[in-house]
Image: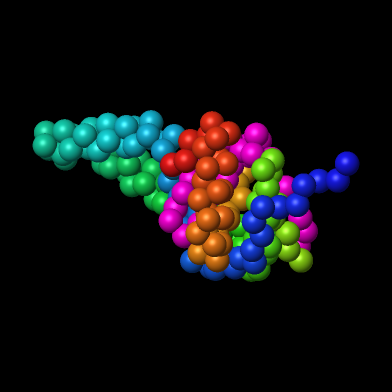
Amino acid sequence: MSAAPPLYSARVRTTEAMVRRAVRAFLWRRVYARSRLWLGVFALLAVSVAVDGWTGPSEAAVASAAVLLLACAMGGVFVWWQWRNMVRRVRRTTPAEATVSLGEANMTLSSGAGRATLAWADCTEAWDLGDFMMLFSAPDRFISVPLVDLPAEAGAFLRSRVAVAGKAVL
């Protein structure tokens, strides 16, 4: 028995801006949103520095300020490094042009770099970002599907298949 032909098939193009937006969305929604505890630690440290500063200059105030500045600098370097690393990785693995085929059971993305098939049942989450959609198969694995080049009915079909699979379209 052969596989059913796709209902929709279109040639799509990924842009640098799209890659950057996908990485930014992933980092802010998935990584940094889970790091709220660190923001609380920084806030407590800042309050400590302010209270120590009001009581007059002391060694504790200077030490607290130094720790706060060092922590902020390290956090900034970490965010910058993580951003650059992810953009590089996604840019390297994302083909500029690909063919998206949408069927009843799965979606296939084919390009010169290879072929990936995602069954709708394996999609754990979907983020609709307007001109593209991010489909997750694991918390840290996603496929970006450009919607700009897809016919309107194919985009609607994609959204409906993800919704029918019971996954949140955010």
Residue 25, percent across and down? 45, 50
Q: As rendered, which of 125 and 8 lies closer to the eye? A: 8
Q: Relative to residue 96, is residue 28 drawn left or right?
A: left
Rendered position, 123 above or below 153:
above
The color scheme shown is: rainbow
Residue 31 seen in this snapshot: no
Q: Is residue 7 visible?
A: yes
Q: Does 57 appear above or below 25?
A: above
Q: Establish if 27 lies above or below 39.
A: below
Question: Is residue 167 or residue 36 the one in the foreground?
Answer: 167
Quadrant of the frame with the N terminus: top right
Residue 102, given in percent of the width and then of the height, sits at: 65, 51
Residue 35 position in % (x across, y down): 42, 36
Pick out the residue farthest to the right.
1
Q: Residue at x 66, y 35 (%)?
A: 122
The magenta-colored residue range is 113-139
Q: Main secondary structure of the magenta part?
A: strand
- Name the quadrant containing residue 11: bottom right
Where 4 sits versus 17, above or below? above
- Answer whether residue 62 is magenta in the image: no
Picture residue at 66% right of the left edge, 60% below the top: 9
Q: How many marks?
A: 0
17 horizontally vs 91: left or right: left
Where residue 161 appears, x then y in whole percent?
Answer: 57, 41
Check the picture and name the quadrant holding the C terminus: top left
Residue at x 48%, y 36% (from the top left corner): 168
What residue is at 47 percent from the left and 60 percent from the top? 131
| In front of the other: 75 or 144 | 144
